Amino acid sequence: MLICRFLKFTLLLFFFTFGFTAHSQNEWEIKLSKNSKSELMGVWEQGDYKIYVELSQMKSFLDHTYQEYTNNILRCTEKDSNLVKYYRPTAQRYLNAAKLIEKANKDFDLRTLIIYHGTEDINQNMGNSAVIRSYIKQLVEGGSAIVTYKGEQIFTLQCKSAYKEQGGILYHGYEIKTFFDDIKNCIFSEFTLLGW
């Protein structure tokens, strides 16, 4: 009886150890919007892909985030603190982007929006905002964006996550690629660094 328990414990310990140290690879599918394009949509082009987003949805995101930063400024007791110097230009960028969306017409190029967090940075004033890209990725993954691939609307995307070790223990993590039918032709490709 004692030997049986010992063997069960050893087997369980093996599975836990293997489960936490094995490098996994996962695959999953994203369901995309089946809606048709409407008149007031913004577009984000990524290689062979075009992502269409309702401008009203984008404006709502920009307005909400602008309000959050404005509220943060009001909560600061010192009006010239470093936090205010961080929040104020960030809030202004969200407001400027929301105003551009208000005036936008059909197929507005979302890459022209300039949003980043913090004080003025000439290098980041070129457009193609990571903030907008991240929000668009969120809309795609949530199934509320229309995606075309090589000119045709598609309704699913594939995702593949794989462990990558690039430079030893200090530079390893997971690479996530999102694509339609060719993993070399990604709509999104990201590397999440795990470090130690």
Image (cartoon, rainbow, N blue to C red):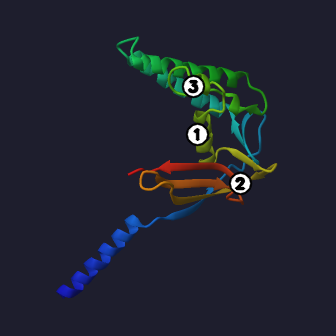
Q: Earlier in the sequence, mark 3 or mark 1?
A: 3
Within-10-Å neighbours for mark 3: few <14, some 14–19, many 20+: some
- Provide residue 126's location: percent of width, then percent of height: 66, 27
- Alpha carbons under labels 3 and 2: distance apart: 33 Å
Q: Which residue carries the number 2 mark? A: 185
Which of pointers 3 and 1 indicates the residue nearer the eye?
A: 1
Instruction: Label 2: state its secondary structure.
Output: loop
Tell me: residue 190, above or below residue 180. above
Asked whether, in this view, residue 71 is left or right of residue 91, the answer is left
Q: Residue furthest top?
A: 79
Q: Which residue carries the number 3 mark? A: 63
Q: Residue at x 63, y 46 (%)?
A: 140
Q: Residue at x 77, y 41 (%)?
A: 37
Q: Which residue carries the number 1 mark? A: 134
Q: Which quarter of the rendered picture does the N terminus lie within?
A: bottom left
Q: Earlier in the sequence, mark 2 or mark 1?
A: 1
Residues at marks 3 and 1 touching, judged by CB atoms closer than 8 Å? no
Instruction: Label 1: state its secondary structure.
Output: helix
Q: Residue furthest front?
A: 167
Within-10-Å neighbours for mark 1: few <14, some 14–19, many 20+: few
- Provide residue 65's location: percent of width, then percent of height: 53, 27
Which of pointers 2 and 1 indicates the residue nearer the eye?
A: 2
Residue type at the position of mark 2: Asn
Q: Quadrant of residue 44?
A: top right
Q: Quadrant of residue 115?
A: top right
Q: Earlier in the sequence, mark 3 or mark 2?
A: 3
Residue type at the position of mark 1: Ser
Q: Residue at x 42, y 16 (%)?
A: 74
Instruction: Label 3: state its secondary structure.
Output: helix
Residue type at the position of mark 3: Asp
Within-10-Å neighbours for mark 2: few <14, some 14–19, many 20+: some
Q: Nearer the viewer, residue 49 or 30?
A: 49
